[in-house]
Image (cartoon, rainbow, N blue to C red):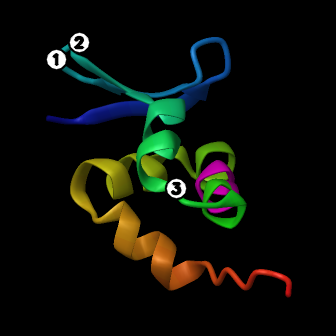
Amino acid sequence: MKLLSCEFNMDTACVELKFADDSMISIDTIAVENEVADNLYQRSELDYLIYNDPAAYADLILNGDPEAYLKAVTEYKPLD
């Protein structure tokens, strides 16, 4: 399937992928964050991808391992 567009829809809080065959995938970003993000730093990383590179976000969620990615790119150190 050829991807025509990938963008974040602020009204629905979804990353929407539209394909040449008129099909569409909508990723509920709030549900994903609730499922995979354990802390504010991980949520912030996902938010950055959503707003700045929705195609990379969609690829991570659909084809990657978001939990492993978040553990690799975020470091959470609680204050003592």
Residue neighbourhood size for the residue with mark 1, other residues' Cα within 10 Å, grouped as few (<14), some (14–19), many (≥20): few
The magenta span reads: 44-48
Element under label 2? loop
Q: Nearer the viewer, residue 18 or 40?
A: 40
Residue drawn 60% across and 45% down?
Answer: 50
Residue neighbourhood size for the residue with mark 2, other residues' Cα within 10 Å, grouped as few (<14), some (14–19), many (≥20): few
State the CA–CA distance, disc 2 to disc 3.
31 Å
Q: Position of residue 66 (x, y in %)?
A: 38, 62
The earlier-in-sequence mark between 3 and 1 is 1
Q: Quadrant of residue 22?
A: top left
The earlier-in-sequence mark between 2 and 3 is 2
Q: Nearer the viewer, residue 62 or 56?
A: 62
Q: Could you tell whether 1 is left or right of 70 in the image?
A: left
The residue tagged 1 is 21
Element under label 1? loop
Residue neighbourhood size for the residue with mark 3, other residues' Cα within 10 Å, grouped as few (<14), some (14–19), many (≥20): some
Which is more foreground, mark 2 or mark 3?
A: 3
Element under label 3? loop
Residue 22 is marked as 2
Judge whether 9 appears above or below 29 on screen.
above
Residue drawn 16% across and 17% down?
Answer: 21
Amino acid on which disc 3 is placed: Ala
Q: Position of residue 77 (x, y in %)?
A: 73, 85
Q: Could you tell whether 26 is left or right of 13 in the image?
A: left
